Amino acid sequence: MPIKRAKSLQILYEDVSDRDLVLTPDAPLASALNRHLDRPHLGDFATTPRRLAAGRREQVEERTVFLELLHETDLSWKQAAYFGEEIIHCWEYTAEPDGILQYDSFDNSKVECAVEQVRHLDTTSRHLTDYSIDDSTDVAVIGESQLTELERSVLPEEYASIDRFTDEPFEMPSFCCFDSSADILQTVLNALTDHPPEDIAVVLDGRSEFSTLLEGALDAAEIPFYGGPGFLDDIDHRTFLRLLRAAFRGSQVRVADVQPILQHLGIDIGVVHDEKRLHTLDELEAKWLVDWCEQVQDGHWTFEMALSKYESILGSAQFDAFHEELTALGIASETVTEDAVNNLEFYLQSYEVPTDHENEGVLLADAKSATHVDRPLVFYLGLDDGWTRTPPQRPWADRQTEFDRHLSQFQLLIQNGAAQHYLVRDTVGGSPVTPCLYFEELLDDSFSRFSEVSNERYRPSRPNSDEGMTTSDHVLTTPTELTTVSQSSLSTYVNSPRDYFFDRIVESPNKDYFREGNLFHDFAEFYVHNPHLVSDDVLDEVVDSILDEMEPFMRDIDRPVKRTRYEAGLSNLIEFLGANAPKPSLLTKSPSGDKRNIFVELLGGSVGSNETERWFENESLGVKGKIDLVQSPSHLVDYKSGSKKSAKEVVTNSALETPSDTPDYQALLYLLHQQAQNPDAELEFTFVHFFENVDDIVRGEANADDILTTVTYQPTSYVEYIKQEDVFARLRDDGAGDCQKTFSKASYDDYAGVFDEVSFPVTRDSDELIDSTFGELLTSRMQDAVGEYKYVSNGCKQAMRELVRIRNRNYFEDDLEAFGEFVDQRLTELNRRHRGEERFPITELLDEPNYRRVDHRDLLLEAER
C-alpha cells in the first residue's frame, strides 16, 4: 500500500470551519486549528474529548490512580502500579470503569477493591464516562479511528467524520544517510544557524541515544527547547538516586560505579582509580561519599534528610518538586532503606512527574506518541526499529486494530511540516540499522537497510571549518617522531593498530593484575639485593604488605585465597633467585631514583643496579624495554604472573611470516637488544611464571622447573645450525628409536651432503619438510648408506620432526635479522600514521583482531567510511 497523503492543516480547517465543535485525537492538532479560527466563537472550537470532558489539560491518570491505590489499599508499589494501569487501559478500551472484571485473570478481590477506589477518582476517564455532547451541537470528528471507545462515548448520535488523508499518494523524501549520530546532530545544529528555533521540530525515539545527545547539544549551544527531558531526566534528580543506590552496594563498590556522581559534582578522581574499591581510596575528595554511604546504610537518615543533605552538597540547588513528591508518596519521613530506594526508583521510572516547562524554542516530539507537529521545518532522527510501537498484549485490545492505528499515526507523523528531513544511519558499530517496521507495510519495495532505497550520503559542515581561515588561524604542530617501540606496544599494534592508537590517547584505569605483577617484580628486585633480609620470620609481614597494597582491588572474601597465592608466588621467586641471581658482590650499583619499593620501606636495605629492572632504549635497533633480571650477559630473566607458555608457544606467538592471533614479541625484542651487546654469544631468555604451581605447592608436590620456560638464541642461521655435526650427533645419540638406529649407521658426511645439494625449505611444519625435496633426498641418502629398510624411512621422519622442533623452540640469527626489519617497517608505518597521512586500521597483519586482547572494543567501529 502506498503512503497516503495527509491533508494540510488549511484543508482540514476548511472541512470543519463551519462546525460548532471539532474533536481531534491529539491536542497539538486542536491547538493548530484554533489558531486558524477566523471568526468569533464562544467556548471550545477544536479540542480533544478529554479536554472537553474535564475542562482542563489532560493529566497522567495512571500516576493519580497509583498514588490513590498506594495510600488507600494494602497493595504493594508494583501491584498498585500494575492494577492501576490495567484498570485505566481497560476503561479506555471498553468505556466501562469496571470492564476489567469481565476477564477471568482479573476477576479477584484485589482488582475489585482497586476498581472501587479508582472509579470515583477525579480523573479525565471519570469525566469522560459522565460526559456527553448535546445532540444539538454540530460536531465534526477528525481522525475518528484514532479515538478510543471511551473517547467515542461522548459523541452525539450524529456527527461528521473527517478523514485526515486524501486519495493522493505521498512522495516521501529520500533518506539522508550519515556516518554517525554526531553528524546527524551537527546537521540539526547547522539548521538552527539559518532558522529560528521556533520554526524547527525534531521527531525522535525518546528512549534512543538521540534524545539525550540532542538535549545536551542544545543545552551546550544555549538553544531553547521543550518537549524533551522530564522529572527523572534532570541530572540532579538522577544523581540523587545514584547516591542512594550507591549506599547499598556495600564496601565492594568500585570508583568506576560512582564516577557519574563524582563528575556531576565536579570532583575529579582520575580514571586510573576506576578499578579500586571506593571505601579503600585515600583521596580526600571521595571521603564525603564514603561518609554519605555509611550514614544511609546505617539507617541514620530519612529521605527528607538525605535530600536536604544533597541540596547542601550542591550548594544553590533547591528541589522543592522532589520534596513534594516524597511527601505525596508518603516516604519523606521514612528511613532510607534499600527496598524503599527500589520503590522510589520504580515509581520515577514508571510515571512522569508533572514539571513546568517553558514552551518555547525547538520542539522535541516523541515518535511513539506524537502525530501532529506544527512547525514548518521538521527533522526525523533515526527512523529505525525503535520507532515501531508494540501493540498491547491485553485481552480487551485487538492487536490488528492497534497495529492499523499505529500505522495510520506513523503515516501522519512523517508528513508534518512544509519540509521534512529524514536523517538516518545505515550502520552502527558495523551492524546494519533496521528501518522502522511500518516502512515495510507502506512502501512497495521491502528493504532491510536504508542504503537499499532512495538515499543520499551526507557529511555535515563543521563550525570553524577551513573555509575562510588563514594559515595563522591554525595551530601548527609537528608530531614527535617515534624512534623506538616497546614489546607491549608492538604486540598491541600488530593485533589492532587502532586499538594501539586509542591506548595512546585514552586514559585507562589501573588494573589489579598490573599492580599485583609490579609488587612481585619489586620483591624480586629487593631479594636480589637483600637476600639476607628475607627470612621465614618476615615472610608473613611481606605477604601482609602485598595484601594491603592490593586491598583497593580485592574483595574481603578473597583475602585468604590471595594470601595462599601470594605465599606460593614468593616461595617460587625466593627458590629461583636463590639459585640463579647474580652474586650481590658482582652487582653494578646504579641510582634507583624516586622509584618506590615497599619492601625497602618494610625491611630496610636498598635496591638499584644495572642487573635488575634494567631499562634500555636502543634507537639504532628501534626497540626499548625493561629487563627484570640480567642473570649474566648471556642470560635474561623475566617474571610473569600469568599462565605459563611453552618454548614453542613463545616462538610461535612471535612469528613474523604468519603472525599469531596472540602476538607477543617480548623475548624476540629483548634478545635483539642483548645480541647487539654480545654479538657472538649464545643467549638464553627465561620466563619465571611464579604463580604457575600454586596448587602443587599447597599439595607439597612442587617442582621448581615447572614454573620455568627458556628459549635459546643461537648466533647462526637456522640452516647452518642444524647442519652442524653437534645436531647430527644429537639425532644419533638422543633421537627417537628408529632415528638413533638409522643415524648411528650413517656418517655425518651423508647428513651434511644433503644440505649442500638442495635448499632447506622455509617451513615450520614437519609434514611439509618430510614431503619436500630436502626430505626426499635425506631419506634416499640414508637408505643408500644404511639400506632400504622400513625403519630407515621412519627414522628420517623422526629426524626431520626433531629439526622442526628445534626451529619452533629457539631463535636464530636470521630470526633476529627478520625481526629488526619488521620493527623498522612498523616504525615507518607508525610515524606515517601519527603524522595523519593515513588512518590507523582496525587490523592489518591479522585477518581480524583478537578481541580478547583489545582494550577499547567499544571504540573500534567497523563500518566502512
Image (cartoon, rainbow, N blue to C red):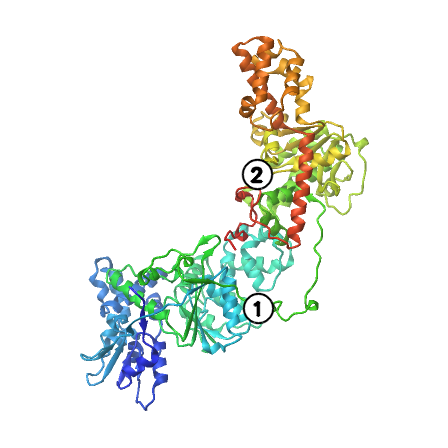
Q: In this rendering, does residue 741 appear at all?
A: no
The amino acid at mark 2 is Thr
Q: Residue furthest front?
A: 757
* Residue 448 rendering spot, x and y as whole percentages: 38, 55
Residue under pointer 2: 662
Near mark 2 (Cα within 10 A), the count class, few <14, some 14-19 or many ≥20, is some
* Whether residue 445 is situated above or below residue 675 in the rendered picture: below
* Whether residue 423 is situated above or below residue 507 in the rendered picture: below
The quadrant holding residue 774 is: top right
Residue 841's disc is none
* Residue 68 rendering spot, x and y as whole percentages: 33, 69
**Could you tell me which residue is drawn at 34 percent across and 79 percent down?**
9
For the N terminus, which image quadrant?
A: bottom left
Residue under pointer 1: 314
The amino acid at mark 1 is Leu
Count of numbered circles in the view: 2
* Residue 250 rendering spot, x and y as whole percentages: 52, 52
